Amino acid sequence: DAGVIQSPRHEVTEMGQEVTLRCKPISGHNSLFWYRQTMMRGLELLIYFNNNVPIDDSGMPEDRFSAKMPNASFSTLKIQPSEPRDSAVYFCASSFRTVETQYFGPGTRLLVL
Amino acid sequence: AQKITQTQPGMFVQEKEAVTLDCTYDTSDQSYGLFWYKQPSSGEMIFLIYQGSYDEQNATEGRYSLNFQKARKSANLVISASQLGDSAMYFCAMREPLSGGYQKVTFGTGTKLQVIP
């Protein structure tokens, strides 16, 4: 079975540009999570969807960040405009019914110059 | 306040020996869950083991076991017979409730384990 799929795997962009990260959760999973990982702050939950509805977005840093889940098989995390401090690895994870077992995608390594 | 504390930023263990990675947590909830994830140098996050707060037995998964001491609020990961492939970052995490009956997971800062041949 395919795991969580994220694209792109690597992204290098210039400050001020729009960045869109994509995630396809595991089929049948109804919860989807976006995380950001940095050396300084560790692994932070940005936003959590359940049945395509955002449940908790308290971790979204600021208005420059937005996330959508138009259907059960696709989600996007958008940064506009991007800043160097947004450089991090962004993970998408999904789970079925409970939060106990989240399966992570391979991550997107973002570098904003 | 820190909800998950991992006090060992780095650990070394000899191959084939056992190692314990420490994790303490803070919660006032009666129902919660604790997990461990492994992150090798390739970057992916791999789920290892889960312990529910009401589980009486310590969770085990192959060479991994979770030493759950509820009164001490600790959930240490024990890896038996360490292998070179166990070298990685290890994250402890806790499930905590959100309003509306939903839950989310908070991660600790991680412990980097290096297995020495």
Image (spheres, coloured by chain):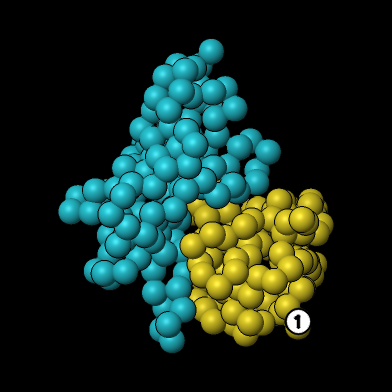
Chain colours: A yellow, B cyan
Q: Position of residue B86 (x, y in %)?
A: 54, 30
In the rendered structure, the answer to whether residue B101 lies left or right of residue A108 reads left
* Mark 1 crowdedness (10 Å alpha carbons): few <14, some 14-19, many ≥20: few
Q: Secondary structure at mark 1?
A: strand
Q: Which residue is mark 1?
A: A71
- Name the chain under label 1: A
Residue projecting furthest to the front: B57
User: Which residue is at a point 71% across and 51% down the rendered structure image?
Assistant: A106
* Image quadrant assignment for residue A32: bottom right
Q: Nearest the camera: A51 or B11?
A: A51
Q: Position of residue B117 (x, y in %)?
A: 53, 13
Residue projecting furthest to the top: B117
Question: In the rendered image of this protein, does residue A62 appear above or below residue B52?
Answer: below
Q: Is any atom of residue B4 visible in this view?
A: yes
Q: Nearest the camera: A81 or B25?
A: B25
Q: How many marks?
A: 1
In the rendered structure, the answer to whether residue A13 lies left or right of residue A41 reads right
User: Which residue is at a point 49% across and 62% down the rendered structure image?
Assistant: A100
Question: In the rendered image of this protein, does residue B89 appear above or below residue B16?
Answer: below
- The amino acid type found where label 1 is placed reads Asn
Question: In the rendered image of this protein, does residue B19 appear above or below residue A80?
Answer: above
In the rendered structure, the answer to whether residue B31 lies left or right of residue A64 reads left
Q: Position of residue A5 (x, y in %)?
A: 77, 59
Q: Is any atom of residue B6 visible in this view?
A: no
User: Which residue is at a point 39% across and 24% down the rendered structure image?
Assistant: B18
Which quarter shows the N terminus of chain A? bottom right
* Image quadrant assignment for residue B22: top left
In the rendered structure, the answer to whether residue A33 lies left or right of residue A2 reads left
* Image quadrant assignment for residue B14: top left
User: Which residue is at a point 54% across and 59% down the rendered structure image?
Assistant: A101
Q: Position of residue A82 (x, y in %)?
A: 72, 66
